[in-house]
Image (cartoon, rainbow, N blue to C red):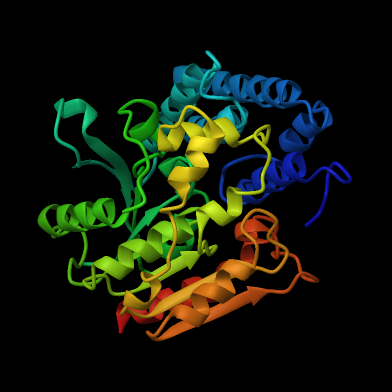
Amino acid sequence: MWYYFPGQYMPSYQVNRALTQAHYGGGEFAECLEVASQITPGDNESFHQAWVNMGNSVYAIGETALENQNPVTARRSFLRAFNYLRTAEFFLKPSDSRKMPTYLKAREAFLKAIAHFEQKPLQVEVPFEAGQADLSQLPGYLFAPTGVKNPPLMIMFGGLDSLAEELYFGISQHLNERGIALLAMDGPGQGYALRVNHILTRYDYNVAGTAVLDWAIANLADHVDTSRIGIGAVSMGGYMAARCAAFDPRFKVCMVFGAVWSYYDIWKNRPDTHPLAEIVQHIVGASTMADARERLKQFALDDVADKISMPTYILHGEDDRQNFVENAYKLDAALTCEHVLEIVPKESSGSAHCQIDDFTKTFNMFDWVAKKMKA
């Protein structure tokens, strides 16, 4: 992985992330590098300020474009603004009063952008938990390929507390251009479902996966082929996708975009001062990291992975410093179904976490998914 800040993994990774997503409308290289030049590595306050300033500036460009009836400029500007504001929110702790307003403005930018798509995605809300109606939903977006009647569908979750909107930048486009629709979801512990609806993550993520699958079958027959639905997820979602696949054999394929065998193992030796520690506490509903680690012990694929029955693709970078490559080897060894393990070697670009340093290394995975889904 290229390091903008030599020796500083976390801020450099986020710069790479924005640059990669710029290929798909989520940024402009010059703007990303201008932001990076204003960041003091290790100083998350400077990280937030640099990204939020750029996000607000580009958001204003989008607003002016709307006033001047320039919808294309507005769309492109709001997409960039979303991603810059999403990045600005990334390291903010849940206790930071700026976190929610930054998130809500980012989401509003995305909603303003998709209102001007030539093919507008369908916004969905999947009933999930009993209780107050507007607080018991998992929201998401259906991105459908152009000119394809009854396409297969991939249901996808992100990772940790990530946002469904982010799955548009690359993942939806690569699936769509291969004739596959994407249902990008905020699952428990993610995006709007966490921040507004207060739905925490859960080790039995298959409950959410099956709820979304049932809803898709019941409600999306006019949009997709409901007999061909796969499951996928990215980053921490590597655990989620595997868990969903293990307990619902109706999924046609499983796409593990970054493997996680045990989320407890990933966090057991990380310090309580880790920049994402409070976020981990938040998604599991713990007041301390000791409590969070105890809860994370349930997030493991022991006696689960061997239940996966559908064809499965595992993609992992050998130089992944967030979910070490051993997670992928463990999952590969445990699977009894038809499956492919692809490890991007550390000498190559794309070997970082979820190939954020070279998204072309995901092409084999998307090609494989398309062939299996259409078979």
The residue drawn where x is 62% and y is 30% is 91
Front-lying residue, 330 or 89: 330
Q: Position of residue 62 (x, y in %)?
A: 52, 24
Q: In the displayed image of the protein, which residue is found farthest to the left?
A: 218
Front-lying residue, 289 or 130: 289
Q: Position of residue 316 (x, y in %)?
A: 60, 68
Where does the C terminus fall, quadrant-wise?
bottom left
Can residue 135 be seen in this snapshot?
yes
- Kindly indicate the quadrant of the structure image that contains residue 290: top right
Where does the N terminus fall, quadrant-wise?
bottom right
Would residue 255 appear left or right of 275 to someone viewing this image? left
The residue drawn where x is 41% and y is 74% is 369
Q: How many marks?
A: 0
The residue drawn where x is 39% and y is 65% is 242
The residue drawn where x is 61% and y is 58% is 323
Q: Position of residue 142 (x, y in %)?
A: 30, 50
Front-lying residue, 109 or 289: 289
- Kindly indicate the quadrant of the structure image that contains residue 113: top left
